[in-house]
Amino acid sequence: MTSDKWAAYREASAPLPAHHWLWPLYGAGLENLGREGRPIQVPMPQCGPGQLLVRHDAVGLCFSDTKVIQVGGAHPRLRGRDLAKEPVVLGHEVAMTVAQVGEGLERRFRVGDRFIIQADIYYQGVGLAYGYALQGGLSQYNVVGREILEGDEGCYLLPISPKMGYAQAALTEPWACVVASYRITHRTMWKPGGRVLIVFGPRTPYGVILGEPFDRSAPPAEVLAYQPTYEVWNSLRVRCAIGHVRLNRLYTLEGLSGQTFDDIVLVGGTPDLYERLEPLAANGALINLIGAAGLTGEAQVDVGRLHYDHIGLVGADRPIISAGYEQPIRSEFRAGGCMLLLGAAGPMGQMHFQRALQAEASPRLIVATSRVMDRLGLLVPKYRDLLEAKAGQTRVLVRAFGEHLSEAFCAELLAETGGKGFDDVIVLAPSATVISEAMPLVAPGGVVNIFAGLPRGTKAAISLYPVVRHGVRLIGSSGSSIADLRQMLEEAESGRLDPNLSVVAVSGLGDAKVGLEGVMSQRFPGKVVIYPQVLDFPLTMLSDLKERLPRVYALLGPNESWTVEAERAFLEELL
């Protein structure tokens, strides 16, 4: 490709084709992706008033894409859509260029503008995610309209710097999910305007008092109390009257089925009582456990809801209801502490690993684990430069644990922390068993972040005693907001974090199915990036470009990492 042709591509000034290619999914299963194992060709979509025609330049393959393939129209984001009649086009990690501007948008956009997209789109209160309800990046072109340009949070397209590469830009989306997991702000009081349920169990501490669980200027709307002590009930009556809060005394819990609460306080509870109350937690709820005496056994905790519904577990052993909120939940990892990454070999695990290494104040110990060593063993050579930069500040251990975290394996890891345990445990392995087995490794005051997307209803046997007695906190994180994406874009454009380090393989659109098969089998130790404007280039690991595209390989960065220069050479040869 000449420099003139490259400039024309960058500026999207070349004539548009009459047709383009895309991968429709017609039902559950990879056999229903495309036709006869190939994408299909369709007429170029028409751009109407108030719309943009966009060209998809790069799209990252995500494990979330494979969940749609597995269940088809039963996926929660598709709401039972009949894919045979209305197929979905996957791909939500997308970099795009404006190819045509519809009437009425001339002052806001121009041909050649480059964007990334916030995948979680809300329009008039309805979720319409890109690559789910809306056609996604596994297509060469797409029309975007009012849902994206005038959504509930404004425009869901974010402009990117001309210096940013296409893959670099596309991968800010998954990276934003990692950034978001360290940006969560948790409440330290009852939710203003929310609903509160207080349940007093069989092991209620002597002399328990209410404390100050809400500010008079921001009270909840309603408080329900079951079997309250005399002292707490009187305190509630006074405070609720001052705050104009509805207060109701419950004489049975049976009538609460189907209701939800923003704060659930369990005083003197037991594991069985916790399991009974957990389904009443609303999205974003905090469950506050007061008193450790009855929590010596294990409870079946819905770790899928911790992840997807952002439920947090807090508590205190002091007989004060507000004490459970007094130790704020720490989202950012502890600088100079000990971090355990459970399932670090996959793309998202590597992103957490890279972020910890590139932080100004990294943990003093990072232990990266996985079930097997084949992909995990690539971490050290891949990130050698970052490890050398942190020599003397951060020690990294790579350990495979097989099918289970055995007692001997856990004892070895605890010894590496000096017996204290890990301040931050990031769960990237989609296994309830691993979560259960890792709980004894958490240090007092430690945070367990359920980052892996376990389905709602997935139960892990967890002792709640450390939550109350030792200040351990359990949280979950899923997805990202447009603010998180902006933050990650700033990190990438400034050079503080380079998403290109996550890339391990590249492909043209025609081999997207091969890439998705590899993601499903967890074959790739990093991200696969599809270039939709290249149709037939086979999926190729970066290390194999040496034979297939030697000029591109010569422009790879340290440790065979993808670069903006290599990407340009790749597109120049293949477009």
Image (tube, helix red, strand yellow):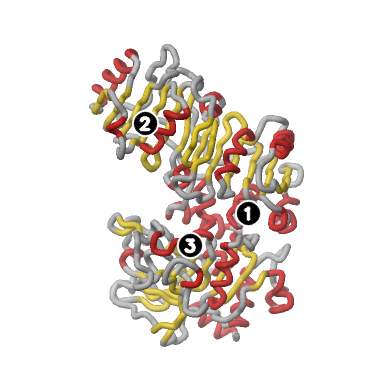
Q: Above or below — where is 394 with respect to 170?
A: above
Q: Above or below — where is 177 with respect to 41?
A: above
Q: Nearer the viewer, residue 341 or 161?
A: 341
Which amino acid is tagged 2?
Trp
Q: Above or below — where is 173 with respect to 203?
A: below
Q: Earlier in the sequence, mark 1 or mark 3?
A: 3
* Whether label 2 touches label 3, CB < 8 Å: no
Circle 1 Cα neighbour tier, 10 Å, few/some/many (<14 / 14–19 / ≥20): many
Q: Earlier in the sequence, mark 1 or mark 2?
A: 2
Which amino acid is tagged 1?
Gln
Q: Say which quarter of the image contains residue 243.
A: top left
Residue sitting at 56 percent across and 26 percent down? Answer: 470
Q: Nearer the viewer, residue 535 or 218?
A: 535
Alpha carbon separation for disc pair 2 and 3: 39 Å
Alpha carbon separation for disc pair 1 and 2: 36 Å
Residue sitting at 57 percent across and 64 percent down? Answer: 168
- Secondary structure at badge 1 equals helix
Q: Where does label 1 land, which residue?
A: 350
Image coordinates of residue 318 in percent, x first then y, are 48, 19
Which amino acid is tagged 3?
Gln
Quadrant that contains the C terminus: bottom right
- Secondary structure at badge 3 equals helix
Residue sitting at 71 percent across and 72 percent down? Answer: 544
Q: Nearer the viewer, mark 1 or mark 3?
A: 3
Q: Which mark is residue 190?
A: 2
Residue sitting at 37 percent across and 72 percent down? Answer: 84
Image coordinates of residue 52 in percent, x first then y, are 36, 73
Q: Where does label 3 land, which residue?
A: 70
Alpha carbon separation for disc pair 1 and 3: 24 Å
